[in-house]
Image (spheres, rainbow, N blue to C red):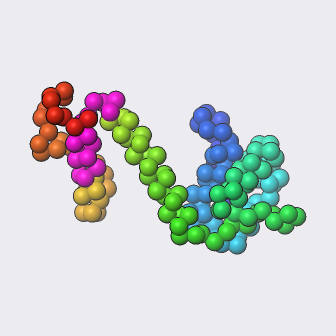
Amino acid sequence: MRIVISNASGRPIYEQIAGQIRAAIMAGELAEGERLPSIRALARDLRVSVITTTRAYADLAAEGFVTNVQGKGSYVLARDAELVREHVLGEVERHLSAAIDAARAGRLSDAEIRASVEALLTADEGGDSRSHGPTRAPDEQSDHGHPGEDR
C-alpha cells in the first residue's frame, strides 16, 4: 500500500491518509482481513505523528472500513455493499454539488446544467466519458435573464 501525503493540499494529513486507505479498500486493492501497517510503522514511514495515523485509523474504524484489534493491529473489514453504495453516492453528490456551484457562478441555467449532464451520460453510454465542450438545451435561448428561465 502506497500513501502519498501533501502539506500543500489544504486537507489535514489524517484525512489524506484515511482517504487513500478508504479508496484502496473500495477499489479492492486491500482485501478483507488484510492487516494494515501498524500505527507506529505508518507514522514512521510517512514521517508524521503517531497521533495523526491514530486519528486516520480511528476514522476508518468509525466508518466501518477497518477494525482495530487491541494488541494485534488494524484489519480491513468486509466491504458491505450498502456501505460502498452510500460512500460512492456521497462522493458523487459532493462532485455534482461542486459542478452545480461552478455552473451557477457561470450563470448557466438549470436547463443548461441538465443538458450537460445528459450529454455526459449519453457520451458515457457510447463508451466515451469525456465531455466535448458546453452543451445547450435545444429550447435554451442564447442569452440569460429572460422571463421563465429555469434558474
| Percent position of residue 119, x then y | 23, 52
* Residue shown at the point (51%, 60%) measured from the top left: 86
Give the camera-side residue of 44 and 148. Answer: 148
Label the magenta part by its dominant secondary structure.
helix
Q: Is residue 148 left or right of residue 60?
A: left
* Residue shown at the point (16%, 34%) measured from the top left: 148
| Percent position of residue 128, x then y | 28, 58
Q: Is residue 68 left or right of residue 20?
A: right
Answer with the quarter of the image where residue 76 lies.
bottom right
Any part of residue 3 in sight: no
| Percent position of residue 51, x then y | 80, 45
Q: Is residue 54 left or right of residue 92?
A: right
- Residue at the front extreme of this rendering: 148
Answer with the quarter of the image where residue 33 lies.
bottom right
| Residue 147 counted in the magenta span | no
* Residue shown at the point (22%, 47%) measured from the top left: 115
Give the camera-side residue of 66 and 82. Answer: 82
Give the camera-side residue of 17 and 4. Answer: 17
| Percent position of residue 57, x then y | 73, 54
All told, the count of numbered labels is 0
Any part of residue 23 in sight: yes
Above or below, comparing residue 100 to residue 53 in the picture: above
* Residue shown at the point (76%, 44%) measured from the top left: 52
Point out the image quarter for the C terminus: top left
Give the camera-side residue of 96 and 132. Answer: 96
Q: Which residues are magenta?
A: 104-119
